[in-house]
Image: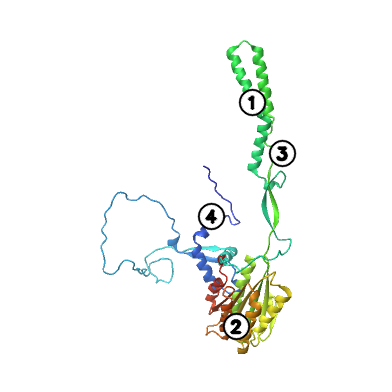
């Protein structure tokens, strides 16, 4: 049995394989730290790496050791304070490296183990098990979408794709084919020589003739090359066209006067998470940014996140603009349509029923998924209640959640885009 030890190093001279094993082992600690980091970070710092702390008790290595052996009898005295299943409170104080205890002249312990995860690792844990719901295959997006696939073995190819096993097998077959007859005759000549030496040791002429034949056969066999260019075999890789999912995400953000600066910051945090998720997980997806107050306008990424324009509130203006863009640029038969709407729920009272009718009759039948996020610590507004009627008609493709503070953003985001089991 042979063992293969992978000692490849990454750029910082750390074993890549060992690091991946370490990240898998402490996955629960890292995911909790990532969730906490998303809630406390600023908007511009949301995608950077993070320092992860692991309690010292959780990094102990398990070991095998010999038990006492034999049969042992132990008597455990009972008590009046605890019963089976009770939880015992953790003792206070104690030098565990946690901080916050009073100064003293005794006691010792160990600090928590702290290590740094990179930006890519941070984003991997942040968006793990997330996906756009109901994404289906549509038309091919173009001839430039290919994936390399194995297509057998070829006698010509790139040296980096040489198949060593198949090449050595071909070389061995060639050597057997070219030298098989000579090896057979060599074995026969050696046997004849041994027999001649035993039966007729005085026949020097016959012995010399066989020795010359054996020498010629050896030279002929040795002239057969161990490996020839004819033997080389290469892995054949071909580019196979793959259907790509054409998808577009509409981001509708309320920037009316009822949206305070704190509420707008929470909405921007949500959309930055969404934008990072789309950019990291999907190569070909369009993102359409729409800001609205009394009127709606399609804007670019810079204006969507940093413009200070404000006004009244008519949510239906954003829905109508989205519907117009869909008709002009994104045919529902070819595109997967998604929408994420963020608002404080405050809307002109006569406009909320209009929003419901637009969604139920015109927009939702073409949508793969629509999510509405209401950012408010108050009771739900009329828009939320009208959207509940939409959810009754489209339970599989419509979702709504409430965000109160920054700590709710990441859990809500995961609820909205949690990967679903195929049905």
**Closer-to-camera residue (373/54):** 373
The alpha-carbon separation of the residues under discs 2 and 4 comes to 45 Å
The alpha-carbon separation of the residues under discs 2 and 3 comes to 73 Å
Q: Earlier in the sequence, mark 1 or mark 3?
A: 1
Residue at the spot of label 4: 18
Q: Is residue 409 visible?
A: yes
Residue at the spot of label 3: 230
**Closer-to-camera residue (420/217):** 420
**Closer-to-camera residue (284/115):** 284
Q: Position of residue 44 (x, y in %)?
A: 61, 73
Q: Quadrant of residue 403?
A: bottom right
Determine whether label 3 and label 4 are within 8 Å by CB.
Answer: no
User: Quick one: SS at disc 1?
Assistant: helix
Residue drawn at point x = 53 percent, y = 72 percent: 411
Q: Earlier in the sequence, mark 2 or mark 3?
A: 3
User: Quick one: SS at disc 4?
Assistant: helix
Residue 184's disc number: 1
The alpha-carbon separation of the residues under discs 1 and 2 comes to 92 Å
Task: Answer with left or right where residue 393 lies relative to residue 81.
Answer: right
Task: Answer with left or right where residue 114 lies relative to residue 299.
Answer: left
The alpha-carbon separation of the residues under discs 1 and 3 comes to 24 Å
Q: Earlier in the sequence, mark 1 or mark 2?
A: 1
Q: Position of residue 256 (x, y in %)?
A: 63, 85
Q: Earlier in the sequence, mark 3 or mark 4?
A: 4
Q: Earlier in the sequence, mark 2 or mark 4?
A: 4
For the residue carrying disc 3, how many other residues have a C-alpha within 10 Å: few (<14), some (14-19), or many (20+)?
Answer: few
Residue at the spot of label 2: 261
The alpha-carbon separation of the residues under discs 1 and 4 comes to 53 Å
Q: Position of residue 413 (x, y in %)?
A: 56, 73
User: Quick one: SS at disc 2?
Assistant: helix
Determine whether label 2 and label 3 are within 8 Å by CB.
Answer: no
């Amino acid at each position: 049995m042979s063992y293969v030890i992978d000692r490849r190093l990454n750029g910082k001279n750390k074993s890549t394989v060992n690091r991946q094993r370490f990240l898998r082992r402490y996955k629960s600690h890292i995911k909790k730290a990532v969730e906490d980091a998303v809630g406390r970070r600023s908007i511009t710092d949301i995608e950077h790496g993070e320092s992860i702390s692991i309690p010292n008790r959780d990094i102990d290595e398990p070991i095998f050791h010999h038990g006492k052996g034999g049969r042992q009898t132990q008597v455990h005295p009972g008590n009046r304070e605890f019963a089976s299943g009770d939880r015992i409170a953790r003792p206070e104080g104690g030098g565990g490296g946690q901080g916050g205890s009073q100064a003293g002249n005794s006691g010792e312990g160990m600090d928590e183990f702290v290590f740094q995860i990179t930006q890519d690792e941070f984003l991997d844990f942040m968006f793990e098990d997330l996906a756009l719901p109901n994404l289906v295959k549509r038309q091919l997006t173009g001839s430039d979408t290919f994936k390399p696939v194995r297509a057998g073995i070829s006698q010509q190819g790139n040296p980096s794709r040489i198949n060593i096993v198949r090449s050595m097998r071909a070389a061995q077959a060639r050597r057997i084919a070219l030298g098989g007859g000579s090896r057979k005759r060599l074995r026969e000549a050696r046997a004849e020589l041994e027999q001649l030496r035993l039966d007729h040791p005085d026949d020097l002429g016959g012995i010399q003739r066989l020795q010359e034949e054996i020498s010629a056969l050896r030279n002929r066999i040795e002239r057969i090359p161990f490996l020839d260019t004819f033997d080389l075999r290469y892995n054949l890789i071909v580019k196979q066209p793959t259907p790509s999912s054409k998808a577009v995400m509409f981001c509708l953000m309320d920037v009316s006067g009822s949206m305070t600066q704190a509420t707008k910051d929470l909405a921007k945090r949500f959309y930055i998470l969404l934008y990072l998720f789309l950019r990291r997980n999907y190569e070909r997806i369009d993102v359409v940014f729409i800001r609205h107050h009394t009127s709606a306008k399609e804007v670019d990424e810079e204006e969507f996140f940093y413009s200070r324009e404000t006004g009244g509130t008519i949510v239906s203006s954003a829905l109508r603009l989205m519907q117009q863009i869909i008709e002009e640029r994104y045919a529902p038969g070819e595109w997967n349509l998604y929408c994420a709407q963020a608002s404080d729920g405050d809307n002109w009272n006569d406009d909320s029923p209009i929003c419901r009718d637009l969604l139920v009759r015109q927009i939702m039948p073409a949508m793969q998924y629509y999510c509405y996020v209401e950012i408010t610590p108050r009771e739900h507004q009329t828009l939320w209640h009208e959207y509940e009627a939409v959810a009754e008609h489209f339970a599989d493709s419509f979702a709504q959640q409430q965000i109160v503070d920054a700590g709710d953003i990441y859990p809500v985001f995961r609820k909205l885009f949690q990967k679903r089991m195929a049905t």
